[in-house]
Image (spheres, rainbow, N blue to C red):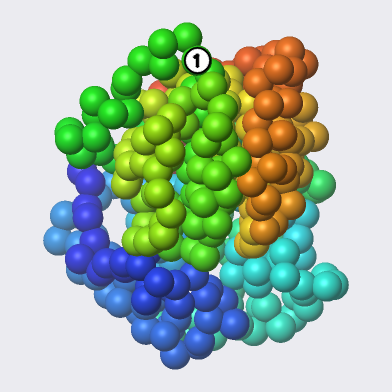
Amino acid sequence: MAYESSITYDWSRAEGRDQHGLGPAGGTSWFHHRVASEYAEIERATRLFRPDVLLVDSFVIGAGLAAEHLGVPWASYVHYLFDEGAETDAMHRVWWEKTGVPEIEAYSAWWDGVRGAVGLGPEPRERQEAPWFRMSPQCTFLLGHPHLRRGTRPLPHFVTRTSLPPWDEPGPASAAASASTASGGRSRVLVANSSAWQDDVDLVRASLEGLSDTDMEILVTVSADHPLGVGTPRNATVLGYYPHADVLPSVDAVVTTSGYGITSKALWFGKPLVTVPRARDQHYVAAAAQEAGCGLTVAWPPKPDAVATAVDTVLSSPALQEHARRLSGPMPGFPSASDVAAEVLSLARRT
């Protein structure tokens, strides 16, 4: 059964941006309170429903700690990109803002403090597994496109890269007609900024300006609460949230801030990319797409002419388009959704 938490976070507005401040820089008391709340809620739910196995989002740290405390088998999944070769948990140390290798002892002390906030003792695992402390030591799945992950070390035995189809929450029915409108033979370009609030709407503005006088159809999705402050050209449609998996089959290229989710979805459908990374893991994602031969990168802050030139290049490059097509669909050699489900269920049978 699926259990939906009553603990919610609004990622769509600027006021919620502090929730991105994970780890030591994010405020210890706030973070401990969040983890303790998750822990208490999942512990109550587990005692009530008595599940045979838990499947946990690795962001919900309290759920994994509750499973450990209760002795319930659990699997976890990771839906973002991080440096798999880092010395510590790269998401929470925000590795891309560091100038050197994080000190593993400092991180381990921080992690033990998180565990202590819910009454658990120090982490029993070896320190060399520090990047995976938040994930299940029994079974962890790395979601997203497997060829975007460029780990420099062998993965632990319990960690598996996967190749699962993209999934989105349903979009508003009122936007469906606009999103699915045929392009009439013109090239169709999707422009998408982050689905969570980040100060990245300049990409949308630059794209609308740079592509306004072209013979292209531009579809823009702005998921978070962003006032654009610019007009919409005649060849563009601007929507709020809309499921990208529904529109990607009908576009020819994608312009994005290099979020791991939209980049993985674009490659699943074999679409070449113009990546415009701003911060966080976006530079890592953009570099991976470019190394895979299916994307071009434009520097931040984006200039309208630079975006337009990159889009023209992507649309006219058979090599970029072919590389993207080769990375479409399920990747051979990586577990499918049914494989992942079977592995999760097998945890229950082992106990």
The answer to whether residue 52 is visible is yes
Left or right: 340 with respect to 295?
A: left
Q: Nearer the viewer, residue 172 or 144?
A: 172
Where the C terminus falls, by quadrant?
A: top left
Instruction: Name which quarter of the figure residue 317 lies in.
Output: top right
Left-right relation of 77 to 171:
right
Residue 315, horizontal then vertical, whole percent: 65, 21
Task: Tell me the residue at 23%/46% (across/down).
Answer: 2
Q: Is residue 46 left or right of residue 191?
A: left
Query: Whole-percent x and y of residue 7?
Result: 25, 69
Disc 1 target residue: 186
Q: Is residue 300 above or below residue 314?
A: below
SS under mark 1? loop
Quadrant housing the N terminus: top left
Q: Residue furthest right?
A: 100
Of residues 77 and 280, the one nearer the viewer is 280
Against 14, residue 329 (above or below) is: above
Q: Residue at x 74, y 52 (%)?
A: 299
Q: Is residue 331 visible?
A: no
Position of residue 126 relative to residue 278, above or below, is below
> Left or right of 335: which side holds 71?
left
Residue at x-position 59% and y-position 82%: 24
Give x and y (percent) for residue 44.
20, 68
